[in-house]
């Protein structure tokens, strides 16, 4: 295995190294929120990009692990109610959710840009039940290539993805989904912080500028999505007081709107398009 391919990751694809590392480190903790043996198997074959050091921190690691856990729980609940379900992860990066919780799905699809899918192919094995789509999420042809299934048996996951697009692109993406898959569950995370925040400025310096921000979940509802559940990542972090530093003494501040809405995991249903 050569590390050369991975070192070519730039821009937004490069950020997948941070969420991947967060899952590796979570797996290695004695008090892990979840275990992820597959990512631990892959990690020694990858090389860390030192430019990401200033963005990666214990609290960022916790936040990405908690986020992964919340998405896992949604995928598990969805399967429990839809035994014939299909899932697609958009901007999957090196997600190992399929290996953690997805093997009961009729089909699980990982979609990412060609350089990322090429990396996955060196680590993971494509099968009839676990497929890899290599293209941009904004190339809507993937919507026509899903296995036949009714929209209410389809789970679409976009973890750590939509914030990298302009609001107009997110609106068009949702519009396309609404037209093709009314009734489908779409789960994604959205940021309520600002482009001027420290994290946003650091990501911009990495060539991965954040572009889409919301005030709260009502902004998403206004786009025609029915909100099934909204979970605040900052509030979820507070479930692990020994890992949040001085914030353990002030859990109430996570209820303040700017913190509560700083990052929301949103489980939504695509309502039929009105236009
Ligand atoms: C922060 S990473 C998240 C990866 C993964 N979802 C996770 O949580 O570990 C963002 C991912 O979005 C992917 N991405 C960026 N632009 C994309 C696009 N236009 N189409 C598909 N994937 C894209 C990147 O390649 C990268 O894998």
Image (cartoon, helix red, strand yellow):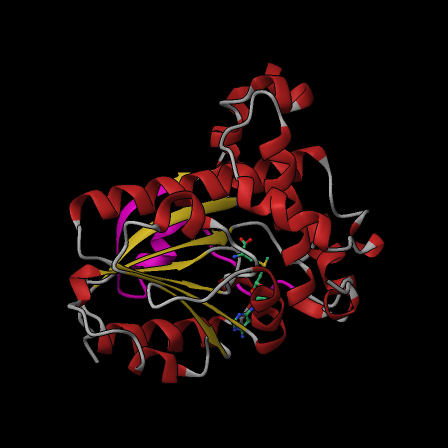
Residue 77 % position (x, y): 26, 41
Residues 32 and 91: in front is 32
Q: Residue at x 16, y 61 (%)?
A: 152
Question: Relative to 25, does residue 213 appear above or below in the rendering?
Answer: below
Q: Quadrant of residue 7?
A: bottom right
Q: Is residue 168 left or right of residue 54?
A: left
Point out residue 95 in the picture as x, y percentages from the top left corner. 52, 54
Looking at the image, how many numbered discs can be counted on the residues? 0
Q: Is 36 inside the magenta-drawn segment?
A: no
> In the image, is residue 218 part of the stretch drawn in magenta?
yes
- Work out which residue is located at the far right of the displayed protein and give it: 50
- Quadrant in the picture for residue 47: bottom right
* Res 199 visible: yes
| Left or right placement of residue 234 versus residue 145 in this view | right
Above or below, 174 relative to 92: below
Q: Is residue 249 positioned above or below 213 on the image?
A: above
Residue 197 seen in render: no
Give the magenta part as a residue range: 209-230
Which of these two is toward me, 236 or 50? 50
| Residue at image point 52% right, 50% down | 192
Compare residues 164 and 100 and report the one nearer the observer. 100
* Location of ligand 1 given as a quarter of the image: bottom right
* Vertical comparison of 274 with 79: above or below: below
Quick one: quadrant of the C terminus?
Answer: bottom left
Name the one closer to the observer, 159 or 7.
7
**Which quadrant holds the N terminus?**
bottom right
At 63% from the left and 57% from the top, the residue drawn is: 16
The reply, left or right, for residue 76 in relation to residue 91 is: left
Residue sitting at x 37%, y 79%: 142
Q: Position of residue 110 (x, y in %)?
A: 44, 65
């Amino acid at each position: 295995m050569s590390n050369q391919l991975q070192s070519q990751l730039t821009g937004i694809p490069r950020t997948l190294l941070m969420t991947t590392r967060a899952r590796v480190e979570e797996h290695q903790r004695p008090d892990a929120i979840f275990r992820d043996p597959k990512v631990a198997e892959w990690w020694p074959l990858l090389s860390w990009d030192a430019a990401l050091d200033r963005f990666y921190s214990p609290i960022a690691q916790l936040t990405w692990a908690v986020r992964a856990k919340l998405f896992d729980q949604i995928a598990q609940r969805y399967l429990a109610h839809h035994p014939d379900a299909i899932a697609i992860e958009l901007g999957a990066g090196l997600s190992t959710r399929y290996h953690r919780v997805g093997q009961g799905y009729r089909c699980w699809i990982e979609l990412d840009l060609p350089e990322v899918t090429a990396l996955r192919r060196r680590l993971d094995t494509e099968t009839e039940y676990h497929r890899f789509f290599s293209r941009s999420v904004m190339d809507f042809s993937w919507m026509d290539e899903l296995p036949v299934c009714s929209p209410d048996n389809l789970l679409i996951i976009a973890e750590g993805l939509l914030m990298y697009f302009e609001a107009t692109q997110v609106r068009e993406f949702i519009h396309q989904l609404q037209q093709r898959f009314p009734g489908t569950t779409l789960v994604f995370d959205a940021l309520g912080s600002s482009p001027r925040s420290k994290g946003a400025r650091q990501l911009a310096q990495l060539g991965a500028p954040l572009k889409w921000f919301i005030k709260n979940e009502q902004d998403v509802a206004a786009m025609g999505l029915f909100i099934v559940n909204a979970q605040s990542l900052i509030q979820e972090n507070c479930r692990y007081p020994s890992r949040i530093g001085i914030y353990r003494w002030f859990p109430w501040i996570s209820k303040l709107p700017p913190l509560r809405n700083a990052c929301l995991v949103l489980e939504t249903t695509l309502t039929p398009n009105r236009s």
